[in-house]
Image (cartoon, grey):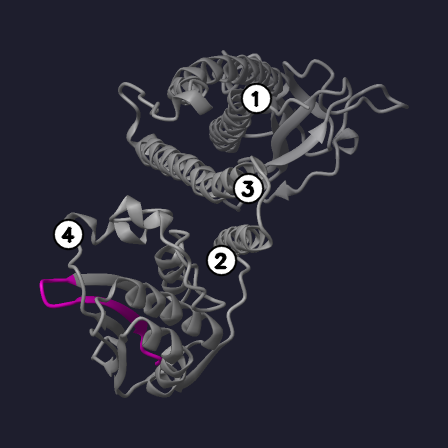
Amino acid sequence: MRGRSLAAALALAFGATTLTVFVLVGSFLYIALEKQIKAQDNLDIVLAARHARRLAEELESAQSLRDHSERLTSVVLGNEALSMEVFDPDGKRAIEHNIAGALAAPDAASGAATVAGLPPLTRVAATARITEADIGDWTGRNGAPIRGIFTDARLRNGDTASLLVARNMSDRWLLLDRYRDKLNMAGVAGVVLAMLLGYLLIRAALRPLRDIAASASLVTVNRLDTRIAVARVPSELEALVASLNAMLERVEHGFQRLSRFTADLAHDMRTPLSNMRGAAEVALARPRSVDDYETLLASNLEECDRLSRMIESVLFLARAEHPQFVKQLREFDAAQELTHIAEYFEGIADDANVRLRVSGTANVTADLELFRRAVSNLLANAIRYTRPGGEIVLDAGVSAEAVRVSVENQGQPIPAEHLERIFDRFYRVDPSRSSLPSSGVSQGSTGSTGLGLAIVRTIMELHGGSVHAESDARSTRFVLRFPRAN
Protein backbone atom coordinates (compact mmCIF):
# COMPACT_ATOMS: atom_id res chain seq x y z
CA MET A 1 0.00 0.00 0.00
CA ARG A 2 1.48 3.29 -1.08
CA GLY A 3 1.88 5.84 1.72
CA ARG A 4 0.46 9.32 1.69
CA SER A 5 2.52 11.99 -0.06
CA LEU A 6 4.50 14.07 2.39
CA ALA A 7 4.34 17.08 0.07
CA ALA A 8 0.55 16.75 -0.21
CA ALA A 9 0.16 16.33 3.54
CA LEU A 10 2.28 19.40 4.24
CA ALA A 11 0.42 21.37 1.56
CA LEU A 12 -2.91 20.42 3.17
CA ALA A 13 -1.57 21.40 6.58
CA PHE A 14 -0.31 24.68 5.12
CA GLY A 15 -3.68 25.28 3.47
CA ALA A 16 -5.53 24.53 6.72
CA THR A 17 -3.24 26.93 8.56
CA THR A 18 -3.80 29.59 5.92
CA LEU A 19 -7.57 29.05 6.10
CA THR A 20 -7.49 29.43 9.87
CA VAL A 21 -5.49 32.64 9.58
CA PHE A 22 -7.83 34.00 6.90
CA VAL A 23 -10.89 33.16 9.00
CA LEU A 24 -9.43 34.87 12.07
CA VAL A 25 -8.22 37.92 10.15
CA GLY A 26 -11.44 38.14 8.09
CA SER A 27 -13.58 37.86 11.21
CA PHE A 28 -11.54 40.54 12.90
CA LEU A 29 -11.85 42.89 9.90
CA TYR A 30 -15.57 42.19 9.55
CA ILE A 31 -16.27 42.81 13.22
CA ALA A 32 -14.07 45.90 13.23
CA LEU A 33 -15.86 47.32 10.20
CA GLU A 34 -19.25 46.51 11.69
CA LYS A 35 -18.35 48.28 14.93
CA GLN A 36 -16.96 51.26 13.10
CA ILE A 37 -20.09 51.60 10.93
CA LYS A 38 -22.34 51.14 13.95
CA ALA A 39 -20.41 53.77 15.91
CA GLN A 40 -20.65 56.25 13.05
CA ASP A 41 -24.38 55.63 12.58
CA ASN A 42 -25.00 55.96 16.32
CA LEU A 43 -23.20 59.27 16.30
CA ASP A 44 -25.28 60.50 13.34
CA ILE A 45 -28.53 59.46 15.07
CA VAL A 46 -27.59 61.06 18.39
CA LEU A 47 -26.47 64.33 16.79
CA ALA A 48 -29.59 64.48 14.63
CA ALA A 49 -31.86 63.81 17.63
CA ARG A 50 -30.13 66.47 19.73
CA HIS A 51 -30.30 69.03 16.94
CA ALA A 52 -33.94 68.28 16.20
CA ARG A 53 -34.95 68.58 19.87
CA ARG A 54 -33.09 71.86 20.20
CA LEU A 55 -34.89 73.29 17.15
CA ALA A 56 -38.25 72.07 18.47
CA GLU A 57 -37.69 73.71 21.82
CA GLU A 58 -37.35 77.07 20.03
CA LEU A 59 -40.88 76.79 18.60
CA GLU A 60 -43.96 78.29 20.32
CA SER A 61 -46.70 75.67 19.83
CA ALA A 62 -47.90 72.61 17.99
CA GLN A 63 -48.95 74.81 15.05
CA SER A 64 -45.41 76.17 14.92
CA LEU A 65 -44.21 72.63 14.45
CA ARG A 66 -46.23 72.32 11.26
CA ASP A 67 -45.32 75.80 10.08
CA HIS A 68 -41.59 75.18 10.50
CA SER A 69 -41.53 71.58 9.34
CA GLU A 70 -38.84 72.28 6.78
CA ARG A 71 -36.61 73.67 9.51
CA LEU A 72 -36.96 70.51 11.55
CA THR A 73 -36.61 68.08 8.64
CA SER A 74 -33.45 69.84 7.50
CA VAL A 75 -31.72 67.90 10.24
CA VAL A 76 -32.05 64.66 8.23
CA LEU A 77 -31.81 66.11 4.73
CA GLY A 78 -29.00 64.79 2.57
CA ASN A 79 -29.10 61.29 4.05
CA GLU A 80 -31.77 59.08 2.50
CA ALA A 81 -31.35 56.48 5.23
CA LEU A 82 -32.36 58.94 8.01
CA SER A 83 -36.05 59.42 8.82
CA MET A 84 -37.94 61.70 11.17
CA GLU A 85 -41.42 61.83 12.69
CA VAL A 86 -42.68 64.63 14.95
CA PHE A 87 -45.80 64.18 17.07
CA ASP A 88 -47.81 67.06 18.54
CA PRO A 89 -48.81 67.15 22.21
CA ASP A 90 -51.95 65.16 21.33
CA GLY A 91 -49.83 62.28 19.99
CA LYS A 92 -50.75 62.85 16.33
CA ARG A 93 -48.05 62.93 13.68
CA ALA A 94 -47.38 66.51 12.72
CA ILE A 95 -44.30 66.05 10.54
CA GLU A 96 -42.90 63.09 8.68
CA HIS A 97 -39.88 62.82 6.45
CA ASN A 98 -38.50 59.88 4.48
CA ILE A 99 -40.24 57.30 6.59
CA ALA A 100 -41.13 55.04 3.63
CA GLY A 101 -43.54 53.05 5.79
CA ALA A 102 -40.83 52.12 8.19
CA LEU A 103 -41.95 54.00 11.29
CA ALA A 104 -45.31 54.68 12.89
CA ALA A 105 -48.23 52.66 11.60
CA PRO A 106 -51.47 54.60 10.89
CA ASP A 107 -54.34 54.26 13.32
CA ALA A 108 -56.91 51.72 12.14
CA ALA A 109 -59.90 54.00 12.92
CA SER A 110 -58.74 57.43 11.82
CA GLY A 111 -56.07 56.36 9.32
CA ALA A 112 -53.65 58.87 10.89
CA ALA A 113 -50.33 57.88 12.40
CA THR A 114 -50.05 58.37 16.14
CA VAL A 115 -47.54 57.69 18.89
CA ALA A 116 -49.48 54.53 19.66
CA GLY A 117 -48.35 53.10 16.33
CA LEU A 118 -44.69 53.25 17.31
CA PRO A 119 -42.82 50.17 18.51
CA PRO A 120 -42.23 49.92 22.26
CA LEU A 121 -39.28 52.32 22.55
CA THR A 122 -37.69 53.98 25.55
CA ARG A 123 -38.73 57.65 25.52
CA VAL A 124 -36.03 60.13 26.49
CA ALA A 125 -37.36 62.87 28.77
CA ALA A 126 -37.20 66.43 27.50
CA THR A 127 -34.76 67.38 30.22
CA ALA A 128 -32.51 64.27 29.86
CA ARG A 129 -29.32 64.19 27.80
CA ILE A 130 -29.52 62.12 24.63
CA THR A 131 -26.77 59.46 24.45
CA GLU A 132 -25.99 56.34 22.41
CA ALA A 133 -27.50 54.23 25.18
CA ASP A 134 -30.92 55.63 24.25
CA ILE A 135 -30.79 54.17 20.73
CA GLY A 136 -33.25 51.33 20.15
CA ASP A 137 -33.52 48.63 17.50
CA TRP A 138 -36.68 47.40 15.84
CA THR A 139 -38.04 46.12 12.56
CA GLY A 140 -40.08 48.43 10.38
CA ARG A 141 -43.38 47.63 8.69
CA ASN A 142 -41.53 46.74 5.51
CA GLY A 143 -39.22 44.37 7.39
CA ALA A 144 -36.22 46.70 7.29
CA PRO A 145 -33.90 46.84 10.32
CA ILE A 146 -34.28 50.23 12.06
CA ARG A 147 -32.23 52.04 14.71
CA GLY A 148 -33.38 55.25 16.27
CA ILE A 149 -34.11 57.54 19.27
CA PHE A 150 -37.54 58.58 20.58
CA THR A 151 -37.36 61.78 22.67
CA ASP A 152 -39.64 64.48 24.07
CA ALA A 153 -39.17 68.18 23.37
CA ARG A 154 -40.62 70.99 25.56
CA LEU A 155 -42.21 73.70 23.42
CA ARG A 156 -42.05 77.33 24.54
CA ASN A 157 -45.71 77.32 25.58
CA GLY A 158 -45.05 74.44 27.94
CA ASP A 159 -46.54 71.68 25.77
CA THR A 160 -44.54 68.50 25.07
CA ALA A 161 -43.96 67.24 21.57
CA SER A 162 -42.28 63.95 20.62
CA LEU A 163 -39.60 63.36 18.04
CA LEU A 164 -38.47 60.10 16.47
CA VAL A 165 -35.15 60.13 14.59
CA ALA A 166 -34.33 56.76 12.97
CA ARG A 167 -32.02 55.23 10.46
CA ASN A 168 -32.78 52.43 8.02
CA MET A 169 -29.91 49.96 8.40
CA SER A 170 -30.63 47.94 5.24
CA ASP A 171 -27.83 49.59 3.28
CA ARG A 172 -25.40 48.89 6.09
CA TRP A 173 -26.32 45.22 6.31
CA LEU A 174 -26.09 44.96 2.54
CA LEU A 175 -22.64 46.56 2.66
CA LEU A 176 -21.51 44.15 5.37
CA ASP A 177 -22.96 41.18 3.48
CA ARG A 178 -21.05 42.14 0.36
CA TYR A 179 -17.92 42.68 2.39
CA ARG A 180 -18.33 39.25 4.01
CA ASP A 181 -18.86 37.63 0.61
CA LYS A 182 -15.70 39.25 -0.72
CA LEU A 183 -13.80 38.07 2.34
CA ASN A 184 -15.07 34.53 1.78
CA MET A 185 -14.12 34.59 -1.88
CA ALA A 186 -10.70 36.04 -1.10
CA GLY A 187 -10.22 33.45 1.64
CA VAL A 188 -11.10 30.51 -0.60
CA ALA A 189 -8.91 31.81 -3.41
CA GLY A 190 -6.09 32.48 -0.96
CA VAL A 191 -6.31 28.99 0.53
CA VAL A 192 -6.29 27.34 -2.91
CA LEU A 193 -3.37 29.50 -4.02
CA ALA A 194 -1.52 28.84 -0.73
CA MET A 195 -2.01 25.08 -1.09
CA LEU A 196 -0.81 25.10 -4.69
CA LEU A 197 2.22 27.27 -4.01
CA GLY A 198 2.90 25.36 -0.79
CA TYR A 199 2.84 22.04 -2.63
CA LEU A 200 5.26 23.31 -5.28
CA LEU A 201 7.58 24.88 -2.71
CA ILE A 202 7.51 21.79 -0.49
CA ARG A 203 8.29 19.52 -3.44
CA ALA A 204 11.22 21.75 -4.28
CA ALA A 205 12.35 21.73 -0.65
CA LEU A 206 12.10 17.90 -0.51
CA ARG A 207 14.21 17.43 -3.61
CA PRO A 208 17.36 16.67 -1.52
CA LEU A 209 15.43 13.74 0.04
CA ARG A 210 14.68 12.37 -3.43
CA ASP A 211 18.36 12.79 -4.32
CA ILE A 212 19.31 10.91 -1.15
CA ALA A 213 16.91 8.10 -2.07
CA ALA A 214 18.36 7.99 -5.60
CA SER A 215 21.90 7.78 -4.21
CA ALA A 216 20.90 5.08 -1.72
CA SER A 217 19.36 3.00 -4.53
CA LEU A 218 22.82 2.75 -6.11
CA VAL A 219 24.12 0.78 -3.10
CA THR A 220 24.20 -2.94 -3.91
CA VAL A 221 26.03 -5.99 -2.63
CA ASN A 222 28.67 -5.45 -5.29
CA ARG A 223 28.90 -1.71 -4.60
CA LEU A 224 28.98 -1.42 -0.84
CA ASP A 225 31.68 1.24 -1.14
CA THR A 226 29.10 3.63 -2.65
CA ARG A 227 28.28 6.59 -0.41
CA ILE A 228 25.39 9.02 -0.50
CA ALA A 229 26.67 12.23 -2.06
CA VAL A 230 24.04 14.96 -2.33
CA ALA A 231 25.21 18.38 -3.47
CA ARG A 232 24.13 21.36 -1.40
CA VAL A 233 22.25 19.27 1.12
CA PRO A 234 20.30 21.44 3.62
CA SER A 235 21.81 21.74 7.06
CA GLU A 236 18.81 19.90 8.55
CA LEU A 237 19.66 16.82 6.44
CA GLU A 238 23.43 16.83 6.97
CA ALA A 239 23.10 14.68 10.09
CA LEU A 240 20.86 12.23 8.19
CA VAL A 241 23.32 11.92 5.30
CA ALA A 242 26.24 11.53 7.70
CA SER A 243 24.37 8.81 9.65
CA LEU A 244 23.44 6.94 6.46
CA ASN A 245 27.02 7.06 5.19
CA ALA A 246 28.31 5.88 8.57
CA MET A 247 25.78 3.02 8.48
CA LEU A 248 26.90 2.08 4.97
CA GLU A 249 30.50 2.11 6.10
CA ARG A 250 29.66 -0.22 9.00
CA VAL A 251 27.72 -2.50 6.66
CA GLU A 252 30.65 -2.57 4.23
CA HIS A 253 33.14 -3.40 6.98
CA GLY A 254 30.82 -6.05 8.41
CA PHE A 255 30.30 -7.60 4.99
CA GLN A 256 34.03 -7.60 4.30
CA ARG A 257 34.68 -9.14 7.69
CA LEU A 258 32.04 -11.79 7.08
CA SER A 259 33.49 -12.53 3.65
CA ARG A 260 37.00 -12.89 5.07
CA PHE A 261 35.69 -15.02 7.91
CA THR A 262 33.81 -17.30 5.51
CA ALA A 263 36.84 -17.64 3.27
CA ASP A 264 39.16 -18.31 6.20
CA LEU A 265 36.73 -20.82 7.69
CA ALA A 266 36.44 -22.67 4.38
CA HIS A 267 40.22 -22.69 4.02
CA ASP A 268 40.86 -23.94 7.54
CA MET A 269 38.18 -26.62 7.31
CA ARG A 270 39.55 -27.76 3.96
CA THR A 271 42.98 -28.47 5.49
CA PRO A 272 41.91 -31.25 7.89
CA LEU A 273 39.52 -32.65 5.29
CA SER A 274 42.36 -32.76 2.76
CA ASN A 275 44.59 -34.42 5.35
CA MET A 276 41.94 -37.05 6.02
CA ARG A 277 41.27 -37.61 2.34
CA GLY A 278 45.00 -37.82 1.46
CA ALA A 279 45.73 -40.24 4.27
CA ALA A 280 42.76 -42.43 3.27
CA GLU A 281 43.82 -42.44 -0.40
CA VAL A 282 47.38 -43.42 0.54
CA ALA A 283 46.10 -46.19 2.82
CA LEU A 284 43.80 -47.55 0.10
CA ALA A 285 46.49 -47.49 -2.58
CA ARG A 286 47.68 -50.94 -1.42
CA PRO A 287 46.98 -53.36 1.41
CA ARG A 288 48.14 -52.16 4.83
CA SER A 289 48.80 -53.76 8.14
CA VAL A 290 46.46 -53.42 11.09
CA ASP A 291 48.89 -50.99 12.73
CA ASP A 292 48.83 -48.78 9.64
CA TYR A 293 45.06 -48.70 9.65
CA GLU A 294 44.99 -47.92 13.36
CA THR A 295 47.44 -45.07 12.77
CA LEU A 296 45.24 -43.79 9.94
CA LEU A 297 42.11 -43.93 12.09
CA ALA A 298 43.88 -42.16 14.96
CA SER A 299 45.06 -39.44 12.58
CA ASN A 300 41.57 -39.03 11.12
CA LEU A 301 40.08 -38.93 14.62
CA GLU A 302 42.49 -36.14 15.53
CA GLU A 303 41.44 -34.19 12.44
CA CYS A 304 37.78 -34.79 13.35
CA ASP A 305 38.45 -33.41 16.82
CA ARG A 306 40.04 -30.37 15.22
CA LEU A 307 36.99 -29.84 13.01
CA SER A 308 34.68 -30.28 16.00
CA ARG A 309 36.59 -27.68 18.01
CA MET A 310 36.52 -25.31 15.05
CA ILE A 311 32.76 -25.71 14.60
CA GLU A 312 32.16 -25.34 18.33
CA SER A 313 34.24 -22.16 18.37
CA VAL A 314 32.39 -20.69 15.40
CA LEU A 315 29.04 -21.45 17.06
CA PHE A 316 30.23 -19.81 20.27
CA LEU A 317 31.29 -16.66 18.41
CA ALA A 318 27.94 -16.55 16.63
CA ARG A 319 26.01 -16.90 19.91
CA ALA A 320 28.22 -14.37 21.67
CA GLU A 321 27.46 -11.71 19.03
CA HIS A 322 23.71 -12.09 19.60
CA PRO A 323 22.27 -9.20 21.68
CA GLN A 324 20.44 -11.65 23.98
CA PHE A 325 23.55 -13.65 24.91
CA VAL A 326 23.17 -14.48 28.61
CA LYS A 327 25.98 -13.81 31.07
CA GLN A 328 25.90 -14.89 34.71
CA LEU A 329 28.08 -12.36 36.45
CA ARG A 330 29.36 -12.93 39.96
CA GLU A 331 32.33 -11.92 42.03
CA PHE A 332 35.09 -14.47 42.70
CA ASP A 333 38.76 -14.72 43.60
CA ALA A 334 40.71 -14.40 40.33
CA ALA A 335 43.94 -15.80 41.84
CA GLN A 336 42.13 -18.89 43.11
CA GLU A 337 40.62 -19.54 39.65
CA LEU A 338 44.02 -19.04 38.00
CA THR A 339 45.42 -21.67 40.36
CA HIS A 340 42.68 -24.14 39.40
CA ILE A 341 43.31 -23.54 35.70
CA ALA A 342 47.07 -23.96 36.18
CA GLU A 343 46.50 -27.26 38.00
CA TYR A 344 44.31 -28.44 35.11
CA PHE A 345 47.06 -27.66 32.59
CA GLU A 346 49.87 -28.96 34.78
CA GLY A 347 50.20 -32.32 33.02
CA ILE A 348 50.28 -30.75 29.55
CA ALA A 349 52.82 -28.20 30.74
CA ASP A 350 55.04 -30.97 32.09
CA ASP A 351 54.90 -32.77 28.76
CA ALA A 352 56.02 -29.55 27.08
CA ASN A 353 58.74 -29.03 29.74
CA VAL A 354 57.13 -25.70 30.79
CA ARG A 355 56.67 -24.40 34.34
CA LEU A 356 53.46 -22.71 35.49
CA ARG A 357 53.36 -20.07 38.23
CA VAL A 358 50.45 -18.07 39.69
CA SER A 359 50.98 -14.70 41.40
CA GLY A 360 48.99 -11.73 42.64
CA THR A 361 45.54 -11.44 44.11
CA ALA A 362 42.31 -9.75 43.02
CA ASN A 363 38.56 -10.15 43.01
CA VAL A 364 36.85 -9.92 39.63
CA THR A 365 33.18 -9.69 38.65
CA ALA A 366 32.58 -11.80 35.55
CA ASP A 367 30.93 -14.89 34.14
CA LEU A 368 33.00 -17.69 35.68
CA GLU A 369 32.75 -20.10 32.72
CA LEU A 370 33.66 -17.38 30.23
CA PHE A 371 36.55 -16.30 32.46
CA ARG A 372 37.88 -19.84 32.57
CA ARG A 373 37.54 -20.20 28.81
CA ALA A 374 39.40 -16.96 28.08
CA VAL A 375 42.28 -17.77 30.42
CA SER A 376 42.41 -21.39 29.19
CA ASN A 377 42.72 -20.23 25.59
CA LEU A 378 45.56 -17.87 26.51
CA LEU A 379 47.32 -20.54 28.57
CA ALA A 380 46.99 -23.18 25.82
CA ASN A 381 48.39 -20.68 23.34
CA ALA A 382 51.25 -19.84 25.72
CA ILE A 383 52.16 -23.51 26.27
CA ARG A 384 52.18 -24.09 22.52
CA TYR A 385 54.70 -21.29 21.85
CA THR A 386 56.88 -21.36 25.00
CA ARG A 387 60.37 -22.75 24.50
CA PRO A 388 61.19 -25.91 26.52
CA GLY A 389 62.40 -25.06 29.99
CA GLY A 390 60.54 -21.77 29.97
CA GLU A 391 58.05 -20.42 32.48
CA ILE A 392 54.48 -19.15 32.15
CA VAL A 393 53.21 -16.70 34.78
CA LEU A 394 49.51 -16.21 35.46
CA ASP A 395 49.06 -12.95 37.37
CA ALA A 396 46.08 -11.09 38.87
CA GLY A 397 46.14 -7.48 40.04
CA VAL A 398 43.97 -4.42 40.62
CA SER A 399 44.47 -0.91 39.26
CA ALA A 400 42.42 2.24 39.73
CA GLU A 401 40.36 1.56 36.60
CA ALA A 402 40.23 -2.20 36.16
CA VAL A 403 41.12 -5.69 37.34
CA ARG A 404 44.07 -6.99 35.32
CA VAL A 405 44.65 -10.69 34.58
CA SER A 406 47.74 -11.51 32.52
CA VAL A 407 49.33 -14.61 31.00
CA GLU A 408 53.05 -14.14 30.32
CA ASN A 409 55.30 -16.68 28.60
CA GLN A 410 58.88 -16.81 27.46
CA GLY A 411 59.22 -17.45 23.76
CA GLN A 412 59.80 -15.92 20.39
CA PRO A 413 58.54 -12.29 20.38
CA ILE A 414 55.59 -11.29 18.22
CA PRO A 415 56.37 -8.52 15.68
CA ALA A 416 54.71 -5.21 16.57
CA GLU A 417 52.69 -5.11 13.34
CA HIS A 418 50.93 -8.34 14.35
CA LEU A 419 50.05 -7.47 17.96
CA GLU A 420 46.61 -6.05 17.16
CA ARG A 421 45.69 -8.44 14.34
CA ILE A 422 46.38 -11.62 16.28
CA PHE A 423 42.90 -11.27 17.83
CA ASP A 424 41.25 -11.46 14.40
CA ARG A 425 39.60 -14.71 13.45
CA PHE A 426 41.86 -17.23 11.71
CA TYR A 427 44.79 -14.82 11.83
CA ARG A 428 48.21 -16.38 12.52
CA VAL A 429 51.59 -14.72 12.81
CA ASP A 430 53.23 -17.81 11.31
CA PRO A 431 51.00 -19.50 8.70
CA SER A 432 52.94 -22.72 9.13
CA ARG A 433 51.51 -23.03 12.63
CA SER A 434 48.12 -23.84 11.19
CA SER A 435 49.40 -27.30 10.41
CA LEU A 436 50.69 -27.96 13.91
CA PRO A 437 48.99 -30.86 15.62
CA SER A 438 46.36 -30.16 18.19
CA SER A 439 47.43 -30.66 21.79
CA GLY A 440 43.95 -31.40 23.08
CA VAL A 441 44.76 -29.25 26.05
CA SER A 442 41.34 -28.20 27.14
CA GLN A 443 37.76 -28.57 26.35
CA GLY A 444 37.49 -24.82 26.14
CA SER A 445 40.58 -24.23 24.05
CA THR A 446 40.56 -24.18 20.28
CA GLY A 447 43.83 -25.98 19.54
CA SER A 448 45.26 -24.56 16.34
CA THR A 449 41.97 -23.49 14.77
CA GLY A 450 42.98 -19.82 14.72
CA LEU A 451 39.92 -18.82 16.78
CA GLY A 452 41.26 -18.97 20.32
CA LEU A 453 42.35 -15.34 20.61
CA ALA A 454 39.25 -14.16 18.74
CA ILE A 455 37.12 -15.90 21.36
CA VAL A 456 39.14 -14.22 24.11
CA ARG A 457 38.46 -10.78 22.62
CA THR A 458 34.75 -11.58 22.22
CA ILE A 459 34.54 -12.68 25.87
CA MET A 460 36.16 -9.45 27.01
CA GLU A 461 33.81 -7.36 24.89
CA LEU A 462 30.87 -9.18 26.48
CA HIS A 463 32.17 -8.02 29.87
CA GLY A 464 32.79 -4.46 28.71
CA GLY A 465 36.53 -4.99 29.08
CA SER A 466 39.45 -5.35 26.70
CA VAL A 467 42.44 -7.53 25.86
CA HIS A 468 45.78 -6.58 24.40
CA ALA A 469 49.16 -8.17 23.82
CA GLU A 470 52.63 -6.95 24.75
CA SER A 471 55.75 -8.58 23.35
CA ASP A 472 59.47 -7.96 23.67
CA ALA A 473 62.67 -9.96 23.54
CA ARG A 474 62.15 -11.22 27.09
CA SER A 475 58.52 -12.38 27.01
CA THR A 476 55.04 -12.05 25.55
CA ARG A 477 52.11 -10.97 27.74
CA PHE A 478 48.38 -11.15 27.09
CA VAL A 479 46.50 -8.81 29.44
CA LEU A 480 42.77 -9.03 30.24
CA ARG A 481 41.22 -5.88 31.69
CA PHE A 482 37.88 -6.39 33.50
CA PRO A 483 35.95 -3.28 34.64
CA ARG A 484 35.82 -2.85 38.38
CA ALA A 485 32.46 -3.35 40.04
CA ASN A 486 30.89 -0.18 41.51
Residue placed at 42% from the left, 84% from the top? 331
Q: Is residue 474 left or right of residue 260?
A: left
For the residues marked 4 and 1, what is the alpha-carbon distance in whole angstroms?
Answer: 60 Å
The mark that comes first in sequence, 2 or 3, is: 3
Asked if disc 4 and disc 1 are in contact, CB closer than 8 Å, the reply is no
Secondary structure beneath disc 3? helix
Indicate yes or no whether the magenta region holds residue 478.
Answer: yes
Q: Earlier in the sequence, mark 2 or mark 4?
A: 2
Q: Are marks 2 and 3 in contact (CB under 8 Å)?
A: no
Residue under circle 4?
415
Q: Could you tell me how far apart the alpha carbons at marks 2 and 4 are, in whole angstroms?
A: 29 Å
Span colored in magenta: 471-486
Viewer-proximal residue among 252 and 71 = 252
Quick one: quadrant of the N terminus? top right
Amino acid of disc 4: Pro
Task: Identify the residue at the far left of this view.
Answer: 473
Q: Amino acid at mark 2?
A: Ala
Disc 2, disc 4: CB below 8 Å? no
Q: Position of residue 213 (x, y in %)?
A: 44, 21
List the residue tagged with mark 2: 320
Instruction: Give whichever of discs 3 and 1 has the lower sequence position.
Output: 1
Q: Nearer the viewer, mark 2 or mark 1?
A: 2
**Amino acid type, residue under disc 1 in the picture:** Ser
In the drawing, what numbered circle is on residue 5?
1
Q: Amino acid at mark 3?
A: Ala
The mark found on residue 283 in the picture is 3
User: Which one is earlier in the sequence, the residue at label 4 or at label 3?
Assistant: 3
- Helix or strand or loop: what does disc 1 sit on? loop
Query: Which secondary structure, mark 2?
Result: helix
